[in-house]
Image (tube, rainbow, N blue to C red):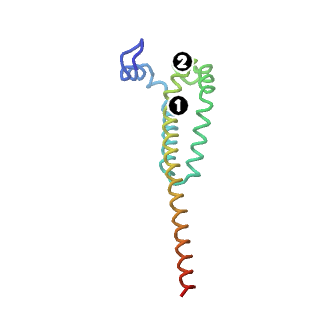
Amino acid sequence: GKHAYTQSFWEDAQAFAHAVDWRNDRWLFGLFALEALSLLAVLLNRRSWERISAVFAVNAAVLFFAQRLNDLAARHWKAFSTQMYFDEHGAFAAVVLGVPLVLIQFLIVIFLLREAALMVIKVKRLELRKDFAKKKQEQKKDE
């Protein structure tokens, strides 16, 4: 959005991308690989509510501790990074960690709602079959 620094979201995104030392801060690719792995686990297991619920729980724990992780990274950034990205507000962590995980969580919720709807349909079909069989049996008794 518009604020004192730039005129548009696109300019903000470009400024962010140019500020990061992509060549030397390889840990970012490790982080993105973990996020991609999380997304892949969700997509491959989308029909297993147990598995995607486990991914949801892990992602939720990471999101819950994101501020603490940001504070820890701010104290020890020289051990793994060429620049200090971790401000007290956690803006960088929110962009590279929070946003991707929240989007994955949203996708998981969609898949879980789909599985719940399919389960309701399955139960209703079984009820209808049972009712139909019961009515058929009652008709045979009446004959």
Looking at the image, residue 62 lies above or below residue 4: below
Tell whether label 2 touches label 1 (CB within 8 Å). Answer: no
Which residue lies at the image location 56% right of the left edge and 76% below the top edge?
Answer: 134
SS category of the residue bearing label 2: loop
Which residue lies at the image location 63% right of the left edge and 26% below the top edge?
Answer: 68
Which residue lies at the image location 45% right of the left edge and 22% below the top edge?
Answer: 21
Looking at the image, residue 89 lies above or below residue 108: above
Apparent side of residue 18 relative to residue 46 in the rendered image (left or right)? left
Residue 84 tag number? 2
SS category of the residue bearing label 1: helix
Locate residue 143, reporting x and y percent. Answer: 53, 88
Q: Nearer the viewer, residue 59 or 24?
A: 59
Q: Nearer the viewer, residue 122 or 46?
A: 122
Q: Estimate how packed mark 1 is, as few (under 14), some (14 to 19) or many (20 or more) residues with alpha carbons within 10 Å.
A: many
The residue under label 1 is 98
Give the residue furthest to the top.
4
First reached walking from the N terminus: tag 1 or tag 2: 2
